[in-house]
Amino acid sequence: MQFWRWLIIISLAGTLAFSCRCRACTTFCFRHQGQWVYGRNYDWDFEDAMIFNNKRGVVKRSVVQTNPVSWISRYGSMTINQYGREFPLGGLNEAGLVIECMWLRYTEYPHADSRGELTELQWIQYQLDTAASVAEVISSDTRVRIGGRSTQPLHFLISDAGGDCAAVEFLGGGMVVHSGTKLPLPALTNNTYAYSRSFFEEVAGDETSLCFRQSDYSLKRFHWAAQGVQSWDAETCGPPVEYAYKILDKVSTDRTMFSIVYDVKQRRIYFKTQSRPEVRYLNFDRFDFTCGTPVKTLGLAMPGEGDVTSLFEDYTLEANYQLIKKSFSATDFLAGTPDAFLRLVAGYPDILPCSD
């Protein structure tokens, strides 16, 4: 009974990680040597976040009160989390799948039905745990849906090692997917993909036009990110990661807390934060994703240079608790949450066992 009590309590925390102010994030990806280079800006009020080494072979259950989903993680992953382990903002898994989320106020998730239910942040972890491709993410919509109390409106840009990329949105209660020829501009900000694409085509590169000048900043950022993707040329644009950061710098705001670049071919995740603008990276293949081995973690804003893989430390409950405490206290509508509640949130990963 205590296990289920924890799940119900956690369900209130995992869905409150965003407020309506989180509206200025940007994602994009372009191809280099057959693989995606994926860029992401996270715009928010504070930069406290941690990178987690998530294991394969872990038995999990969604933190909702009705129609919970049970699964065993098939793939290990590295994720960036602000509100505690198991509730990521995005990440990369062993199969080369990348998922990142952005605010989309037009989102309407499916109404309650017979499918299993996940919160929006745990949906990200579920996909990284179970999917190797964009197609598998899309097919999961027949089995699971985002639901639960206090879910926040998000959409997602997803890429895989097989060369597919998709913008996944939930509009009018159903999943809407743009991929393949329907995704000529693999970028996403805070308007629907269809509206952003039509804006880009209307402007046609003319930033002096009335259409561009009177548009909201999300559309401008989409325009710049899409231009950057279109202009990518391996022969003339220089190193791809540096080029990705040029795009991210172009679309950054004074609230850009951190910038991530996933180089899937090289199996590296690059990152910089507002307080530490030097670019560092981790080597994905140097991590052990076997269940039962120590989970590794690193603060995103911790000091370091170049390859910081060796700086990762063993995960502790206290580290997770301190992350959650900082993030809750810095989020106005979560400030003042009882400490006992925060400790329950922090302890949630410890009740997830390895499978037989």
Image (cartoon, rainbow, N blue to C red):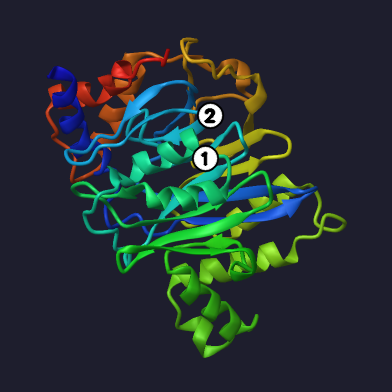
Few, some or many residues within 10 Å of mark 1 (<14, 14–19, 20+): many
Q: Is residue 317 or residue 108 the one in the foreground?
A: 108
Q: Residue at x 42, y 42 (%)?
A: 124
Residue 162 shown left or right of residue 147 in the figure: right
Question: Which quadrant is home to the N terminus?
Answer: top left
Query: Identity of the amino acid at label 2?
Result: Tyr
Q: Quadrant of residue 123?
A: top left
Residue 46 is left or right of residue 117, and the answer is right
- What residue is rendered at 66% in x and 33% in y? 268
Which numbered disc, 2 or 1, marks the residue that appears first in the sequence?
Answer: 2
Compute the Cα span from label 2 to label 1.
Answer: 8 Å
Q: Do tag 2 and tag 1 residues touch (Cβ < 8 Å)?
A: yes
Q: Secondary structure at mark 1?
A: loop
Point out which mark residue 113 bears: none
Number of numbered discs overlaid on the protein picture? 2
Q: Residue at x 58, y 38 (%)?
A: 271
Of 116 and 326, the residue lying toward us:
116
* Residue corresponding to mark 1: 131
User: The residue under label 1 is which amino acid type?
Assistant: Ala
Q: Secondary structure at mark 2?
A: loop
Disc 2: which residue: 75
Q: Is residue 134 above or below residue 190?
A: above
